[in-house]
Amino acid sequence: MDKIKVGIIGSRFAADFHCDAYSRNENVEIAAVAAPDNLEEISRKWNIADTYEDYREMLNRKDIDLVSACVPNFLHHEIVVAAANAGKHVVCEKPMATTVEHARDMIDVCKKNSTRLFYAEDWCFSPALNRVDKLIEEGGIGKILYVKAKEVHNGSHSPFAKNKESCGGGCFIHLGVHPVGYILYLLGKGKNPVVEVTGKMTGGGELNFVHKDNGGEDFGMGMMRFGNGEFAFVEGNYITVGGMDDRVEIYGTEGVLKVDITLGSPIDCYSRPGISYSIEKTDHNLGWTKPAVDEFYNLGYVQELEYFVNCVRNNEEPFYGVDGQAGLACLEIIKAFYESNEKGVTVRGSWL
Ligand SMILES: NC(=O)c1ccc[n+]([C@@H]2O[C@H](COP(=O)([O-])OP(=O)(O)OC[C@H]3O[C@@H](n4cnc5c(N)ncnc54)[C@H](O)[C@@H]3O)[C@@H](O)[C@H]2O)c1
């Protein structure tokens, strides 16, 4: 079978790890990249033959099978719709969109064009969390009662994430979408709905703890209850210094699982001059650090994009958790968290 030809839209942080993952896959050719800036740097780094300033021109190409939308959240809808209408399968970065209505439309347009929509929740492919799946499957911790999960760091590098309109909110939609998405995959499985959410957040701008220049909140936490009775607690915040901290704790009737996805490393390094890089979102890398071995692998990006490419090759739908339905459910739940925070109440519904 011929290689799958991929077009990347976007040229910075997410585009870089998509290129890294595709480059490790012998069944993929990164055919082109489209973005309004940084084209020379990204095309040189990943040896990409064609560049486009306007992504619509790239979508006109007949030979591209799969598109990666690595653009700010507010552009996900526009780009997924354009890609599907051009007959391309599309990987959409998280969160799926900035509104529930946009996410629904994206699912409809992809369905209408018989193109696949892959929702990039990489936690579903983290090797540590995949091992956890197996331990749960074999009955190692009994029946799950409670899950606690978070993604936290010291603030986004992206100007689009600091702006409430282009992000769709603050840290809760931008980071909290990972724990929400993972817990939906783990407990919801498309059958067990979230029925109750209660959220608490800082107020954005001057009402934030630290990031007064961010329109959206810089701290968010929330409780979810599932139809089958399980509880979950999720956090997303920009007030955590010392590197990106992604953690999951799962409490069952017969045991407990605790996972450190990002900070743990088999390497202990002490450096007097400091090293160039240890892990994502550290302020400095002097003295003792724990440099990651392969962050893109540990976070699941490599395996995620390999899986999506295989879905295209084998003409298969993605599983619940990384499909449009899960991406939509995440947004419905996050919207309910925002409503809960604003009104100071618990919001009830049924989200799958
Ligand atoms: N899965 C993850 O863990 C993860 C991590 C980081 C970012 N993301 C997601 O990836 C997306 C991009 O984030 P980022 O960190 O790369 O942001 P970024 O600010 O680093 O880059 C944004 C990119 O979008 C491009 N862009 C802006 N307007 C465009 C347009 N009209 N057409 C085409 N390209 C345009 C810019 O050129 C730039 O390359 C966001 O949705 C973010 O949530 C996901």
Image (spheres, helix red, strand yellow):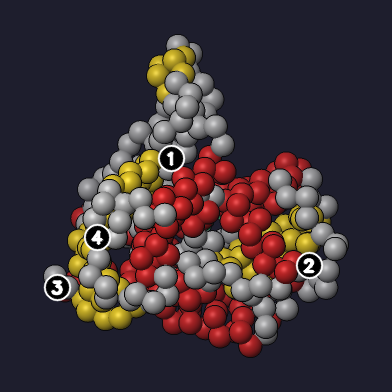
**Furthest-top residue in this view:** 272
Residue situated in front as seen by the camera: 328 or 215: 328
Question: Where does ligand 1 appear, by image quarter?
Answer: bottom right
Residue indicated by mark 1 = 262
Name the residue located 78 percent from the left edge and 55 percent from the top edge.
Answer: 27
Q: Which amino acid does label 1 sit on?
A: Thr
Residue situated in front as seen by the camera: 112 or 184: 184
Above or below residue 42? Residue 269 is above
Question: Label for residue 145?
Answer: 4
Nearest to the eye among marks 1 and 4: give it. 4
On the image, the x and y values in percent for residue 143 come to 29, 60
The image quadrant where one finds the N terminus is bottom right
Q: Which amino acid does label 4 sit on?
A: Leu
On the image, the x and y values in percent for residue 36 come to 65, 58
Distance from Cα at disc 3 to Cα at disc 4: 23 Å
Name the residue located 63 percent from the left edge and 88 percent from the top edge.
Answer: 112
> Element under label 3?
loop
Give the class, few, some or many, for how many residues have Cα within 10 Å of label 4's Cα (few <14, many ≥20). some
Nearest to the eye among marks 4 and 2: give it. 4
Q: Is residue 120 left or right of residue 335?
A: right
Q: Earlier in the sequence, mark 1 or mark 4?
A: 4
Residue indicated by mark 2 = 64
Query: So how many labels did they put on this image?
Result: 4
> Element under label 4?
strand
Give the class, few, some or many, for how many residues have Cα within 10 Å of label 1's Cα (few <14, many ≥20). some
Q: What residue type is labelled 3?
A: Val
Q: In this view, does 280 lie to the left or right of 6?
A: left
Q: Does mark 1's beta carbon lie closer than 8 Å to ligand 1?
A: no
On the image, the x and y values in percent for residue 270 come to 44, 15
